[in-house]
Image (spheres, coloured by chain):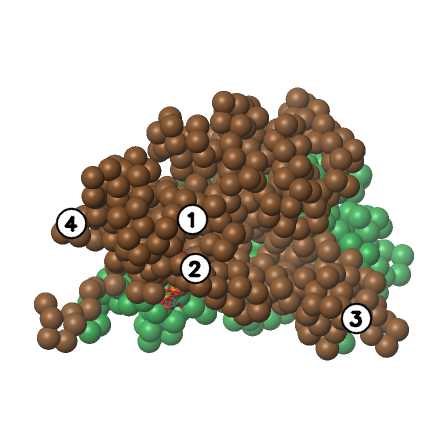
């Protein structure tokens, strides 16, 4: 029995961390936030094989599983890295592989990082009155909100029946509009469809669900990393900042804020590992742990984001320090693919409690 | 990642399940100390190796090789079936492990068997009116007089002192040494002349703890664990054991399942409580926290089995998070019941034996006892996050 990483996984984590530490400092994130691209970062990760992570070997991938993806996601969150990882590496390959269809061409292009697939799932999770997707035969009409990865070549669109469609970004009748959100480490778009031809990927709701589950666990892993970084920054800052003639880290109010963050975050680590492991290995538990992990990390992430900012005093509130990138990253991870109340209600439904 | 315990452990799990199915009904609901039912259940558990499992046979235990996975399976199965896992208490969970580690041959032979069998009940004499969180400032003194220590002073919050046969007690034997190096760890009979116990009624309205006064209590010299002045280290070995047992996530899970059952059956205006979306959300929130703590426990276990795995601060946070979580869970059990949740003791409307109120208070006690939540946060920040200690206050007029 070992509840932890293999040697290969430790190596994977070290490599990704090293790459991100060297290539994605906060200044690089700011360039993206100011409108720059993420292509060089994505290329660097592609050189390490990251986009191929979940794609089976016979389709040009590496054939690892959700835990490996969660390890990478934690590092990406730690460095608030702009990437199309969630859609292109995690959710799209999961859906394509489960769909039963032959998508080898696209999967191979995803494996090398040459193509990007964005995700437009909102209308199947919590449809707002300003959006909906209707399908006639395989033609889409309507709107998807907060599709992520603004630079995708394709979008994987879910309609309210949890059917999945693949839409080419260049398809006739498709419009893409940037949606400005607080989280500048990622870019989201509104997609509007005016009778857009789409390829039906799956009409089996369980394909949608499995794709959603892994997406949620990966967002939770991203929050784990982002929150850990905020805690690390808070502790480091507190040791070095002096007031009243002593480091603020020696004030108990500050120590207890940090201890509370650490105490709530530490079990999240195990929770993310377990949930990711369950996706591939414990089918009876997978959906429930995915829901709870998404919701719990959302709550802890919110708490750590607020508290670590407070530890920094006025400096925490500045753009100069840039802590707000992590704060907002935790915020968007919380809302995307189901906010905590919604996800907890799903958890209750899964247990027959609704 | 490998969560399988292996086929040999599945057989073991089956044995435990079979035992519980066959004998479960003999178990006492809650462990009333010294009742025949409690003691014969305890002996049955020892005979079968489900408690005192790794304690050597010569001291009355089952004598199995330590196997963390087996222990975990036992804990899981007892919790799942909500069957009494045997006696805990300070003698069994704290003193016995300490004697095994630091006691003399004679002490082990004398105390361990009757303690684990539930015949010898212990109390813990640590806290004093002037020494709670700052335990090392305790002043109860013991002075050597011939072959005896002569103990004078007062302890407080001594749980079960009124029932205990013996006490393990921290006393100051080296008044001139620095405060952590002047303490010794004594064991003595509660019937020794000079001991007076005054019950303290606690918020549950039972007198579970006491004030314990010592006036010239004579304790044979050899009834010391460890050397003179080493009592602080001995006590800390014990505190580790105590904290491990305080936030057990398997038991929390069993409690959560009881709460879910209650919410499915109890109705308000004809609707089951579980249909109320606010209660349901609160339940799910707690379920998520319980899950996180269970997986945290798995990581702690794994790092004990795989020496190369670093548990981080996973173990250090268990007392803080586990007791707070349990308190919140019990509080939800009260809230969902509305006015009925107020019932305490005998009342035709009381549900689940009134246990939500009892446990809600009991866990507040555990949040305070055994190192308060604030002290836990000090430990986490200083030892876990390497933050500096609070500077000493300089008293007015002093140095
Ligand atoms: C139900 C129960 C059973 C108990 N059973 C036993 C027993 O059997 N034997 C025994 O010896 N003792 C027992 N205790 C005592 C227990 O260990 C003490 O109550 C506990 O250590 C706190 O000490 P205190 O009560 O003196 O509170 P204090 O130490 O006076 O604490 C009061 C408040 O001040 C805070 N505080 C104190 N120091 C600090 C600090 N450095 N930083 C931040 N905050 C601080 C505390 O967190 C608390 O909120 C029991 C207590 C309870 C509640």
Q: Where is residue B70, by image quadrant?
A: top right
Task: Using the numbered discs, state the Cα–Cα distance from disc 4 to disc 3 in whole angstroms.
Answer: 58 Å
Q: Earlier in the sequence, mark 2 or mark 3?
A: 2
How far across and how far down the image is residue A209, in percent? Answer: 75, 51
- In this rendering, the answer to whether B148 lies above or below A25 is above
Residue A270 visible from this viewpoint:
no
Q: Secondary structure at mark 3?
A: loop
Task: State yes or no: discs 2 and 3 in contact (Cβ < 8 Å).
Answer: no
Mark 2 near ligand 1 (CB under 8 Å)? no
Where is residue B201? Give x, y as percent: 51, 68
Q: Residues within 10 Å of mark 2 (few under 14, many from 20)?
A: some
Front disc: 4 or 2: 2
Q: Colour of chain B?
A: brown
The tag on residue B197 is: 2
- In depth, the one of A167 and A66 nearer the eye is A66
Sooner in the amino-acid sequence: mark 3 or mark 1? 1
Query: Are the numbered discs 2 and 3 placed on the same chain, yes or no?
Result: yes
Mark 4–mark 2 Cα distance, whole angstroms, equals 30 Å
- Quarter of the figure with residue A67: top right
Q: In this rendering, do the residues under marks 3 and 1 share a single chain?
A: yes
Identify the element where label 2 is drawn.
strand
Contact flag, marks 2 and 1 (Cβ < 8 Å)? yes
**Residue that carries the numbered disc 4 in the rendered image:** B177
Instruction: Quarter of the image for the N terminus of chain A: give it.
Output: top right
Identify the residue position indicated by label 1 in the image: B190
Q: Nearer the viewer, residue B22 or B265?
A: B22
Q: Which mark is residue B349?
A: 3
């Amino acid at each position: 029995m070992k509840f932890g990483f293999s040697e290969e996984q430790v190596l994977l984590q070290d490599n990704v961390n090293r790459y991100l530490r060297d290539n994605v400092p906060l200044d690089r994130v700011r360039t993206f936030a100011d409108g720059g691209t993420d292509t060089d970062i994505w290329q660097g990760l592609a050189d390490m094989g990251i986009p191929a992570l979940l794609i089976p070997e016979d389709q040009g991938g590496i054939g690892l599983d959700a835990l490996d993806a969660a390890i990478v996601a934690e590092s990406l969150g730690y460095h608030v890295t702009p990437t199309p990882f969630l859609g292109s590496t995690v959710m799209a390959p999961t859906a394509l592989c489960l769909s039963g269809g032959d998508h080898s061409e696209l999967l191979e292009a995803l494996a090398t990082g040459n193509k990007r697939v964005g995700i437009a799932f909102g209308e199947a999770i919590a449809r707002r009155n300003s959006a909906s997707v209707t399908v006639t035969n395989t033609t889409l009409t309507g709107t998807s909100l907060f599709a992520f990865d603004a630079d995708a070549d394709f979008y994987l669109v879910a309609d309210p029946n949890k059917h999945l469609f693949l839409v080419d970004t260049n398809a006739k009748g498709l419009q893409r509009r940037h949606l400005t959100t607080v989280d500048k480490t990622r870019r989201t778009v509104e997609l509007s469809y005016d009778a857009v031809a789409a390829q039906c990927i799956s009409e089996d709701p369980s394909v949608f669900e499995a794709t959603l589950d892994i997406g949620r666990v990966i967002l939770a892993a991203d929050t784990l990393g982002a929150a850990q970084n905020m805690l690390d920054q808070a502790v480091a800052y507190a040791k070095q900042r002096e007031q009243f003639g002593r480091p603020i880290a020696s004030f108990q109010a500050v120590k207890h804020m940090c201890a509370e963050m650490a105490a709530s975050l530490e079990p999240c680590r195990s929770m993310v590992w377990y949930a990711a492991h369950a996706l591939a290995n414990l089918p009876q538990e997978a959906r429930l742990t995915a829901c709870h992990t998404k919701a719990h990390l959302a709550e802890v992430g919110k708490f750590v984001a607020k508290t670590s900012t407070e530890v920094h005093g006025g400096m925490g509130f500045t753009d100069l320090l840039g802590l707000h990138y992590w704060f907002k990253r935790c915020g968007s991870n919380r809302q995307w693919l189901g906010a905590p109340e919604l996800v907890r209600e799903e958890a209750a439904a899964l247990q027959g409690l609704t | 990642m490998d969560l399988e315990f292996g086929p040999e452990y599945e057989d073991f799990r089956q044995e435990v399940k079979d035992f519980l199915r066959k004998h479960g009904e003999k178990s006492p609901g809650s462990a009333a100390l010294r009742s025949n039912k409690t003691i014969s259940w305890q002996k049955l558990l020892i005979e079968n190796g489900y408690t005192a499992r790794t304690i050597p046979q010569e001291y009355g235990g089952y004598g199995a090789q330590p196997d963390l996975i087996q222990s975990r399976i036992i804990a899981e199965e007892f919790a799942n079936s909500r069957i009494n896992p045997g006696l805990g208490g300070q003698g069994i969970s704290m003193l016995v492990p300490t004697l095994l580690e630091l006691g003399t041959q004679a002490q082990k032979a004398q105390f361990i068997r009757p303690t684990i069998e539930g015949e010898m009940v212990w109390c813990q004499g640590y806290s004093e009116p002037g020494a709670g969180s700052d335990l090392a400032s305790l002043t109860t003194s013991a002075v050597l007089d011939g072959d005896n220590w002569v103990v004078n002073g007062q302890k407080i919050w001594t749980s079960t002192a009124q029932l205990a046969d013996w006490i393990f007690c921290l006393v100051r034997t080296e008044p001139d040494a620095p405060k952590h190096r002047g303490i010794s760890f004594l064991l003595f009979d509660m019937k020794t002349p000079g001991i007076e116990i005054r019950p303290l009624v606690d918020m549950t309205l039972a007198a579970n703890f006491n004030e314990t006064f010592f006036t010239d209590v004579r304790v044979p010299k050899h009834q010391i664990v460890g050397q003179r002045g080493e009592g602080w280290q001995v006590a800390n070995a014990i505190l580790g054991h105590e904290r491990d047992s305080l936030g057990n996530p398997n038991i929390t899970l069993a409690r959560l399942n009881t709460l879910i059952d209650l919410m499915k059956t109890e109705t308000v205006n004809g609707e089951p409580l579980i249909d109320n979306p606010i209660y349901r959300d609160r339940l799910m929130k707690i379920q998520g926290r319980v899950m996180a703590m269970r997986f945290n426990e798995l990581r702690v276990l794994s790092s004990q089995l795989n020496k190369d795995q670093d548990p981080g601060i996973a173990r250090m946070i268990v007392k803080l998070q586990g007791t707070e979580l349990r308190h919140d869970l019990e509080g939800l059990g009260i809230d969902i019941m509305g006015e009925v949740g107020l019932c305490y003791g005998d009342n035709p409307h009381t549900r689940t034996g009134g246990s939500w109120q009892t446990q809600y208070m009991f866990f507040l006690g555990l949040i305070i006892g055994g190192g308060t939540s604030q002290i836990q946060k000090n430990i986490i920040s200083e030892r876990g996050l390497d933050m500096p200690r609070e500077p000493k206050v300089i008293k007015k007029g002093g140095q």
